[in-house]
Image (cartoon, rainbow, N blue to C red):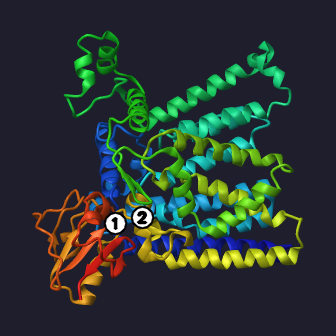
């Protein structure tokens, strides 16, 4: 028994160590992505000035977490690889790995937990977002943690458990607004389904016993959430830098809007963020660039495209483990509703909204799929030998595919999308090209001895910072300090174009370029064109 326990600890330590090497290795080889520096800057302002105007679209906690190292030295935000803000996310990623093991073990047993942990460690979407100074992985950690404690304590919530669960849920709500439809709604459904006699839901006695528990949860969640705003009072429509927004004109004739603009209340900024997120997701007021399979749009994409994005970005072996569990075990195991119902709510939410199709928005799907897929080791329909051979084949395929994508996990697509030189035709932006390739581009420029490089970069970092010698052509870079010059595609020039710029700057329609294929792809997403 002791030997088995030691083996279990060795296996867990190996998995966490392997994941640490992959995450830190990616940090050292990738330039900051489009949002990272901005996220860390916003978080620093939140921590120092308690000024939440900088980001009206999301709550502050994740940004505050990644900005914590800046309290010691603000310059870490502007480091070439923003190492320390990224390491804050890495800590949450490793914590999530341990949580996946515990959750899976409680649901489906030790063997399933080991498989789930191994699947988690080598899942490319989690590895990609698991080392960026961004909100998505931190949000996913609190999401799974809240769901875990809800499942663990579902039969009996003591006072101590109510307090712990409410604090964790408050922290979850303070990371992303999508935690409301992703978590609160499915938990309500799961709670209702857990009641043995459904007719009790309409009785006075049932609600009398539980009303104080619900009020206590709501109070503790609200206080926790408000604490991330440093207990600041703000108007429900929030303070903004923009003094010409429509609400100001409407407030002159509408007393309710005037109240919402001028009267500070607790959680005023959070209420404003809910409003802004709703407008962004369900209206055409904001540009939401998206691209998939040759179709580009400035107003997001129809919801039915999201399953396609999920399919292209998810390793095929993981899908081949998940689907048999879905088909075979669902009718036998009641515990599975705690995984499948949250999955259903996440997919319904993104399908009904008009957000840009970015896979990181549904990052909590991957831990849920992994936990669910882990139970395949418990299936008894086929002989153990056949099952283990099948598992071994899929795991070798799975791990090899992930290691092949190292260190640019954000550019990962499965075999259905073809080879690395073909993937830019399917997805762009944070699904593929998020500005991570400048370090690789500098190395490529030096190794090839390139003297006349023209660059169209998508990102928020000035390429000059990395010592890249180039001429700037039309691009989507925020802080590129150079003047734009005309494209010169001849034998004397090498052209480097970020995949997102390829479509949204019109290079795919440029007759000088569109008949050529890139000679290589650098940094996972920068297309290189050259005439010989």
Displayed quadrant of residue 367: bottom right
Whole-number angstrom distance, CA of label 2 to CA of label 1: 8 Å
| Image position, residue 427 (x, y; %) | 43, 61
Residue shown at 43%/51% (left/top)? 65
Residue 141 visible to an observer of this rendering: yes
Tag 1 secondary structure: helix
> How many discs appear?
2
> Which callout, 2 or 1, points to the residue nearer the camera?
1
| Label 1: few (<14), some (14–19) or many (≥20) C-alpha neighbours in 10 Å | many
Disc on res. 50:
none
Q: Residue at x 42, y 32 (%)?
A: 270
Q: Residues within 10 Å of mark 2 (few under 14, many from 20)?
A: many
- Residue drawn at the location 71% of the way across and 71% of the way down: 9
Q: Position of residue 157 (x, y in %)?
A: 74, 34
Which sits earlier in the primary sequence, circle 2 or circle 1?
2
* Residue designated by label 2: 432
Q: Position of residue 390 (x, y in %)?
A: 77, 75
Q: Are marks 2 and 1 in contact (CB under 8 Å)?
A: yes
Foreground of the two, 515 or 355:
515
Q: Quadrant of the N terminus?
A: bottom right
Residue at the spot of label 1: 499
Label 2, secondary structure: give it.
loop
């Amino acid at each position: 028994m002791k030997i088995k326990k030691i083996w279990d600890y060795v296996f867990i330590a190996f998995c966490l160590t392997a994941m640490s090497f992959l995450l830190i290795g990616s940090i050292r080889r990738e330039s900051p992505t489009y949002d990272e520096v901005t996220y860390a800057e916003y978080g620093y302002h939140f921590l120092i000035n308690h000024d939440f105007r900088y980001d009206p679209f999301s709550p502050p906690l994740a940004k505050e977490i990644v900005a914590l190292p800046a309290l010691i030295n603000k310059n870490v935000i502007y480091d070439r690889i923003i190492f320390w803000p990224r390491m804050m996310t890495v800590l949450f990623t490793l914590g999530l790995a341990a949580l996946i093991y515990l959750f899976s073990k409680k649901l489906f047993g030790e063997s399933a937990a080991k498989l789930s942990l191994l699947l988690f460690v080598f899942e490319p979407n989690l590895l990609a977002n698991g080392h960026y100074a961004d909100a998505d992985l931190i949000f996913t950690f609190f999401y799974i943690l809240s769901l875990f404690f809800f499942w663990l304590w579902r039969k009996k919530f003591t006072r101590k458990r109510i307090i712990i669960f409410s604090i964790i849920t408050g922290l979850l709500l303070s990371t992303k607004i999508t935690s409301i439809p992703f978590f609160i709604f499915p938990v309500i459904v799961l709670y209702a389904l857990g009641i043995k006699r459904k007719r009790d839901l309409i009785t006075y006695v049932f609600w009398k016993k539980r009303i104080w528990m619900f009020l206590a949860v709501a109070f503790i969640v609200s206080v926790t959430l408000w604490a991330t705003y440093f207990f600041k009072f703000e108007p429900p429509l929030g303070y903004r830098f923009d003094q010409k927004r429509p609400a100001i004109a409407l407030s002159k004739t509408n007393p309710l809007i005037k109240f919402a603009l001028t009267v500070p209340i607790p959680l005023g900024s959070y209420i404003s963020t809910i409003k802004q997120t709703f407008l962004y997701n369900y209206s055409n007021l904001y540009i939401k660039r998206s691209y998939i399979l040759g179709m580009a749009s400035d107003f997001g994409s129809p919801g039915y495209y999201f399953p396609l994005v999920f399919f292209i970005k998810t390793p095929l072996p993981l899908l081949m483990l998940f689907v048999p569990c879905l088909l075979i075990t669902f009718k036998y195991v009641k515990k599975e509703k705690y995984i499948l119902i949250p999955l259903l709510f996440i997919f319904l939410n993104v399908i009904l909204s008009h957000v840009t199709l970015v896979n990181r928005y549904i990052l909590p799907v991957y831990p849920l799929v992994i936990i669910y897929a882990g139970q395949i080791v418990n299936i008894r329909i086929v002989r153990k030998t056949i099952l283990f051979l099948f598992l071994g084949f899929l795991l070798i395929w799975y791990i090899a595919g992930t290691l092949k994508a190292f260190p640019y996990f954000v550019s990962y697509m499965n075999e259905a999308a073809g080879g690395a030189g073909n993937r830019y035709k399917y997805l762009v932006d944070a699904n593929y090209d998020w500005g991570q390739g400048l370090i690789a581009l500098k190395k490529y420029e030096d190794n090839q001895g390139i003297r006349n490089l023209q660059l169209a970069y998508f990102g928020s970092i000035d390429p000059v910072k990395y010592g890249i010698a180039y001429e700037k052509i039309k691009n989507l870079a925020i802080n590129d300090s150079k003047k734009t010059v005309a494209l010169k595609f001849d034998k004397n020039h090498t052209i480097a174009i970020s995949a997102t710029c390829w479509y949204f700057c019109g290079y795919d329609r440029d007759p000088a370029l569109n008949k050529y294929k890139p000679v290589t792809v650098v940094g996972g997403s920068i297309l290189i064109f050259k005439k010989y």
